Amino acid sequence: MGKLEGKVAVITGGSSGMALASAKRFVEEGAYVFITGRRQEVLDEAVEQIGRNVTGVRGDASNLDDLDRLFDTVKRQKGKIDVLYASAGMGEFVPLGEITEQHFDAAFGLNVRGTLFTVQKALPLFNDGGSIFMTGSVASMKGYSGFSVYAASKAALRAFARGWLNELKGRNIRVNVLHPGPIATPTQDLVLDEEGKRFFESQIPPGKMGRPEEIATVALFLASDDSRFVNGVELAVDGGLSAI
């Protein structure tokens, strides 16, 4: 029997990268998974890759109507949620002095506002004893030049987790933050050039980028009963980058 046998999981931003790898792992461990993505063709490909026990719902986590459609679909098909992995997010390098309203609003609109309403709208379907966790970033623990807005938006998730676990303690719902380090994903290719990748690899003690599957292993831990006494943590999965 898998670690998520009979569980229902929702993963926002689950059509690529770390979240897609996690969706695959969850299904392998017995879960039924709902994933979201903004581009229908990419979402369809992700559903095909997962292969079974999955529903793809196109939508943007910063759009409240899209979130309503997601959870209406979950309610209609399964009627419950056991695991919520709020992973939809974005970030780009913009140095202080060049930050625009559009850049700020996009980062906080998806990473903070989107995460908040994803969790809030999921709660009516949530089973007691379930697990909520969010994708943060080690950028919120370091001081990378040009990444201050993204880092600040991810740092907000720490405050969310601490407040929400207190509010949800009567339902025994735990809330955690998973902080990935540099991970080799298609999204990373859009943010970092080859020089940037070499810089981060030089900072990671093992000397190489992480893989999406290594994040998926930790996501499974946070989703399963293996982490039933883990609550309110910021778990860095970064090869030691944030420790030095």
Image (spheres, rainbow, N blue to C red):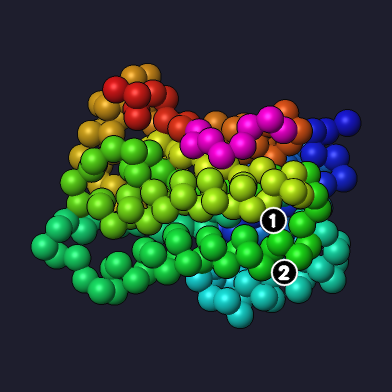
List x then y, in percent, for residue 160: 51, 53
**Residue 124 drawn above or below residue 9:** below
**Magenta-colored stretch includes residue 5:** no
Q: Specify the segment rendered in magenta.
A: 228-235
**Residue 104 drawn above or below residue 204:** below
Quadrant of residue 54 in the image? bottom right
* Left or right of residue 81, residue 23 in this image: left
Q: Which mark is residue 35?
A: none
* Left or right of residue 40, residue 238 in this image: left
Quadrant of the rendering where the C terminus is positioned: top left
* Left or right of residue 7, residue 224 in this image: left
* Residue behind mark 1: 10
Residue at image position (46%, 32%) is: 236
Distance of label 1 from label 2 (alpha carbons): 9 Å
Q: Amino acid at mark 1?
A: Val
**C-beta proximity under 8 Å, tags 1 and 2:** yes
Q: Main secondary structure of the magenta part?
A: loop
Q: Amino acid at mark 2?
A: Phe
List x then y, in percent, for residue 121: 66, 68
